[in-house]
Amino acid sequence: MVIELNFASDNASGAAPRVLDALVAANSGYAMPYGADEWTRAAEIVLCKLFERECAVFLVPTGTAANALALSAICPPWGAVLGHSEAHVMDSEAGAPEFFTLGARLVRVGGINGRIQPKALRETLKAYPRGVAKQVQASALTISQASESGTVYRAPAIAELADIAHSAGLQVHMDGARIANAVAKLKVPIADITWRAGVDVLSFGGTKNGAPMCEAVVFFDNALAENFLIRRKRGGHTVSKARFLGAQMSAYLQDGYWLELARHANAMAAKLARGLRQVPGVRLPWPVDVNEVFAVLPARADAALKSAGAAYYSWPVKGLSVADRPRKGETFVRLVTSFATRPEDVAAFIEIAGGR
Amino acid sequence: MVIELNFASDNASGAAPRVLDALVAANSGYAMPYGADEWTRAAEIVLCKLFERECAVFLVPTGTAANALALSAICPPWGAVLGHSEAHVMDSEAGAPEFFTLGARLVRVGGINGRIQPKALRETLKAYPRGVAKQVQASALTISQASESGTVYRAPAIAELADIAHSAGLQVHMDGARIANAVAKLKVPIADITWRAGVDVLSFGGTKNGAPMCEAVVFFDNALAENFLIRRKRGGHTVSKARFLGAQMSAYLQDGYWLELARHANAMAAKLARGLRQVPGVRLPWPVDVNEVFAVLPARADAALKSAGAAYYSWPVKGLSVADRPRKGETFVRLVTSFATRPEDVAAFIEIAGGR
Amino acid sequence: MVIELNFASDNASGAAPRVLDALVAANSGYAMPYGADEWTRAAEIVLCKLFERECAVFLVPTGTAANALALSAICPPWGAVLGHSEAHVMDSEAGAPEFFTLGARLVRVGGINGRIQPKALRETLKAYPRGVAKQVQASALTISQASESGTVYRAPAIAELADIAHSAGLQVHMDGARIANAVAKLKVPIADITWRAGVDVLSFGGTKNGAPMCEAVVFFDNALAENFLIRRKRGGHTVSKARFLGAQMSAYLQDGYWLELARHANAMAAKLARGLRQVPGVRLPWPVDVNEVFAVLPARADAALKSAGAAYYSWPVKGLSVADRPRKGETFVRLVTSFATRPEDVAAFIEIAGGR
Amino acid sequence: MVIELNFASDNASGAAPRVLDALVAANSGYAMPYGADEWTRAAEIVLCKLFERECAVFLVPTGTAANALALSAICPPWGAVLGHSEAHVMDSEAGAPEFFTLGARLVRVGGINGRIQPKALRETLKAYPRGVAKQVQASALTISQASESGTVYRAPAIAELADIAHSAGLQVHMDGARIANAVAKLKVPIADITWRAGVDVLSFGGTKNGAPMCEAVVFFDNALAENFLIRRKRGGHTVSKARFLGAQMSAYLQDGYWLELARHANAMAAKLARGLRQVPGVRLPWPVDVNEVFAVLPARADAALKSAGAAYYSWPVKGLSVADRPRKGETFVRLVTSFATRPEDVAAFIEIAGGR
């Protein structure tokens, strides 16, 4: 067995076998293009069943598209999207939300461990009072579940944020690129942390957790989806051979496969966290709720891992409290596990970090 | 053998076997995301080789994305994109060019058989003189090869249009969603009908001719590609598990597979055209150069085909000369063949149309 | 008396005396900025009275702003604005409608003498069926009153076009840059050719007819104006010392001054047309309804006028029927009169053109 | 003499007499529209002379237009504009910079007293490294002179910020809505605090300091102005009867009138500040460099002024250090003087605030 030390991203993994098998199996005969096929319809049905209600479902090939398109449906060009300072939409999507909303503003809200604090949300809303024509209009709140810091919100926390947002006239988006990992952690029905908690539109991720390339935008209010077909087409995200998206999503969800994959990824991260906490000089500033471990590494460990070929990214320190920030010689890194991470790889990583 | 009468679209076909096999084979181990993988690199290399020169290559999941992103690189928000009245960008992409260019104007240029006439191009350019600040600025010419009417341009025709465009300060885009079919027809090196004829940026199609979902934007002038990475990311078209795009493109091009697929599609269309021309009351207004047959069907043939379950689209008549337009009871339809079309299917279609 | 041969544009005239006097008189003490002043309020009241109903009124400094902002309120980014091929928004506003709508498409509708033909409108609408997600959505009709060819629509003609538009789900804008001239010609209440005929939002021009710089956007449906304050501010068209706009508009409308100015301009054009029709070799292709005369001039007349220092623009011939187009040596020109044009100037122009 | 207690805004004042007189005097005969007139040309010449060099000058009717258009010329849609947290572009222009740049991001930089701190600028730039395709690209720095807190930058401070910006590949805009007041305070040639200090494009304000409505965008690098004519037209800011802008700007600058007006406004603010500092319970958190006084008022003073009919705005406290923030019962207000403010008005205001 070749040890693989790739903890750079869940996107560095390939496809989960049953999802890829389904994509291959969909290559059978003719199918009407642009979403008028049976695989797409099946994916819509399975998503509605998962959410225990009717939803308006749209498949797209990337997570950036899902987020930006969803936000464009709830935020006008003169609006503002409020989200956590460290959220993926803020610094990792090249301004896609601004592009798809045609000029809305992203406004950063604070909060420790990657989670928006209700108090910070209230104060930000005060700075953007609705109806003042000289200012952009606060229109959307985006919540990342799991957060960009690898933590999760429990249902009541989401409901509290959504209530604040709705009371101020905003609508609520959830970036669920890692929602499978969050559900696997929280062990609650996905409805409880989405529409039952006040989420209006969800980016339901598939790719990071095992699909080759497939995400869904799920609206819990049909009125919001009114122009979405044309928005998606105009954005170039209406895939012609759409069966190849539908097949991915259906297989991903069938028989709880998505949660099985996520539970494994989470377990690998938990194992990695446990091991790293034993390594002298390593600090983990944030709770490890899902499949990401954020760690301050001493120089020695970082060097040993790098020379062993380990892959991971150093991470911006601005999300850290001052006390947690790396000191001289230390590095702050993100380590991501996935459905493909093996226990042996984790063990090897810990050993090398520990200098053994 | 079950006869399949689906001539609705080349997108109604699935994936060509060797392309799908390559996608599956790419599911091996870890690969850095967002295009920093070996499959993407291989696709870039094979495309440069195909074009006999250095190019800046960017893979995207859809043809609409390829066209709109390419146009945004050569047309400012206050620019105009000139294209044939019947071109795909005009009425089949939901305004994606306007969206990605952030407000440019599409200007329709005339020409029979789906091909822009040099004279019409010159007259249109006169109506949009550069430097007149009260008008949008003619900035890009887009040429469809093959055209939306299933015809092709020979190299000198492209060069003539490109010369006119360049002389007026425009840059030249080619929509090559069906460029494989055009090359298969023309039997010339692809360089001859692209950069050697004056094309500055090409949408190189893969999906219609056998890829599950993969297109390439190919720049023949690196300066035009300067901001393309961020444009693509901002548009949500930078695929995270990019290996699955790269693998498609490499396999598609390897050992001339793309031309093999296109030759078959073209041959099926030629066979279909030959057959239909023998059917009393059927008229084919345009030459059949590639894998599309446009036909005026008598009511009887249309009804027989429909009741036999044949799938095809009726088509706008505005591209037809007045003499060619359908008379009472007739229908104007588009019939598309693909790598997957079988001679038996074509024969059956002709038989049913012929009332046998 | 110095003869002035400036027929280049109504914008070449300065300000009508009573409008300028009012602007000067408004320079008295303090006034709250951005429209919260008594002059702006007075203008709103006088406009509502003129239209015999409640309206939502917004003053802006330019006609391009009025048109583009108004269209942005009734056409989404993925929409299409249908207007006459020769309309001002098409070729004289540098794509401002595309900019303010954030990417909508302008679609040219035909019709002789600058007026949209109902039949042409119906055919254009067929080419843009609502709800087809691969196409931009026909959303707004814009009617120019007076038209760009100096002709007017009677109330029933407007109502017919508006009915067709409304039935297809579009809303109706009127470009009233020269609406004063149209009302002076038609001698009907302005309500009859605007909201009573189905117009939803009007650009009410002031500048061409005597204001230094002042136009109004007038909504006849408050719901359409919902976000207009922020749209105007975001476009930089919310003037800080707004009293100087309000004062212009109030004085312009007081005691029928606007119609007095327009009647004079129209009369001067009528006189000019009468005179030119007597000049051998001069042809006037279009009716002269308001303050614009379009004329084909023989080379000799054109040369004589130019050498006498006359100012006017040659005009695109594409709006002309083939029979009317200038032949070799002839020039097609636009001659515009205004409140400032004097009978002596018109007489001199005719004399020079006639070679006397 | 009626005492006027209006300190709400410099925009609440009307027009300075010599500027208004010139506007009236321009109403003479015909003038070619859209800027091809002698008044516009004269304004261009006088501005070039003022700046001791060739400049590309464009007149526009509002300050928001000047800022947003200028920024659009130096920041692409995927760019970021860095500016002080309290700058006018951030919260008082309804997202006009986002609209004109077609989607760029505004990024807030810290600094006390309304001035950007070099250290804060450097740190912000680190968070937006150029060339990282997953992030928006830091492209423009905007400096407000005078600042939104009524303070000024000395020439070396501007040069330091401009150097940092240029080194990182950004271009530098100055919002000079109150640059007259800054020059009056600093007593240096305007060239020293603009292009000689590294400013690439300036919004040169006229309106707040006495013009009815006139601002200039001044480029110190012609290449940046390349597309500005069409940008301005497309934004609806190319005034047709442009003579009325040109006349304002020329008169405003003639014989140092603009500085005379600004010196008076500054002197009135200084007098107001001196007086208020004597009032028990009043605190002035920021230096009073120009024509704005920011004051924490005790409840009693605020009530007395309000009941005497004084007009002024309460102001957001987020720009204040924690120590300076108003305590229970206190109000934080902005008081603005102008060319029209009289010593008697200031004296009366102070007396009422002091409870006499």
Image: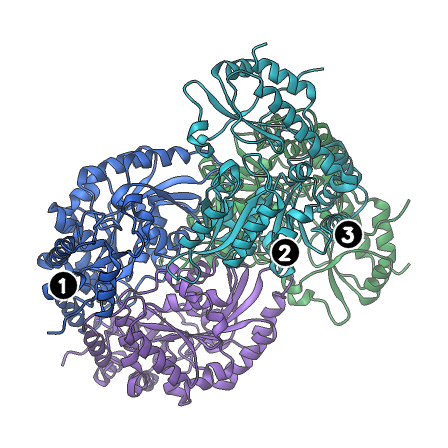
Chain colours: A blue, B purple, C green, D cyan
- Tell whether label 2 touches label 1 (CB within 8 Å): no
Q: Looking at the image, is B188 positioned above or below residue D211?
A: below
The reply to the same-chain question for discs 2 and 3 is: no
- Residue at 51%, 74% in the rendered image: B172
Q: Looking at the image, is D344 positioned above or below residue D77?
A: above
Which secondary structure, mark 3? loop
Q: To which chain does the residue with label 1 belong?
A: A
Residue A8's label in the rendered image is none
- Residue at 73%, 31% in the rendered image: C24
Q: Residue furthest top?
A: D356
Residue at label 1? A351
Residue at label 2? D229
**Residue B237: horizontal and vertical position, in percent?**
35, 63
Foreground mark, 3 or 1, reads 1
Q: Specify whether D264 is left or right of A2.
A: right
Residue at label 3? C7
Q: To which chain does the residue with label 2 belong?
A: D
- Front residue of D45/B176: it is D45
Foreground mark, 2 or 3, reads 2
**Residue A57: horizontal and vertical position, in percent?**
24, 53
> Residue A249 occupies which quadrant of the picture?
bottom left
Instruction: Give the distance between the C-alpha atoms of the residues marked 1 and 2, in whole angstroms.
Output: 65 Å
User: The disc labelled 3 sits on which kind of residue?
Assistant: Phe
- Front residue of B13/A283: it is A283
Which secondary structure, mark 2? helix
- Name the quarter where the C terminus of chain C is drawn: bottom right
Q: Looking at the image, is A270 positioned above or below residue B130?
A: above
**Tag count in the figure?**
3
Which secondary structure, mark 1? helix
